[in-house]
Image (tube, grey):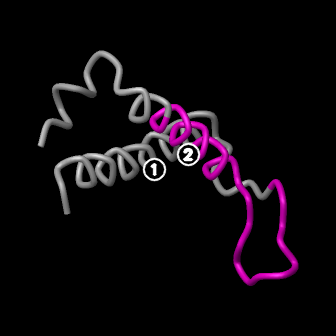
Amino acid sequence: MSKKDFFVLILFIVDMFVAFAICSYFNISNVVLLKSYTAMNMDITYEVLIWFGLAIIQAIFIDRKEIFANSIYED
């Protein structure tokens, strides 16, 4: 596992905690927005949507390798 992969994994975990903190602050934790009938326990909640939005923003920064990315990802 390279430094880049490890850093991305850590950022995804941080994104999960941030999404949970935002939902806890606004008291919208575990609110089911979409319930899947094709799979068990696969509900779309606000936490999932916030995490996905943060992951997309993170991916944009990583792919473009702007400002901070070049210094972090040097192998």
Q: Please indicate whether residue 4 sits to the left or right of residue 17 in the image.
A: left
Query: Above or below — where is 63 with respect to 11?
Result: above
Query: Above or below — where is 9 with respect to 35?
Result: above
Query: Above or below — where is 24 with respect to 48?
Result: above
Q: Please indicate whether residue 49 sits to the left or right of residue 56 in the image.
A: right
Q: Quadrant of the N terminus?
A: bottom left
Q: Residue, x 67% and y 46% (percent of image)?
A: 49
Residue count near mark 1 (Cα–Cα under 10 Å), binned few <14, some 14–19, many ≥20: some
Residue 45 at x, y = what percent?
A: 71, 54
Residue beneath disc 1: 16
| Three-letter amino acid code of the residue under disc 2 | Trp
Residue beneath disc 2: 51
Question: Label 2's element?
Answer: helix
Q: Residue, x 49% and y 31% (percent of image)?
A: 60
In magenta, the rendered stretch is 33-59
Q: Are marks 2 and 1 in contact (CB under 8 Å)?
A: yes
Q: Quadrant of residue 15?
A: top left
Q: Which mark is residue 1?
A: none
Q: Is residue 8 magenta?
A: no
Residue 44 at x, y = what percent?
A: 73, 59
| Three-letter amino acid code of the residue under disc 1 | Met
Question: Label 1's element?
Answer: helix
Q: Quadrant of residue 34?
A: bottom right
Q: Please indicate whether residue 39 sits to the left or right of residue 71 in the image.
A: right
Q: Is residue 58 magenta?
A: yes
> What whole-number distance in Å separates the C-alpha atoms at marks 2 and 1?
6 Å
User: Residue at the top extreme?
Assistant: 67
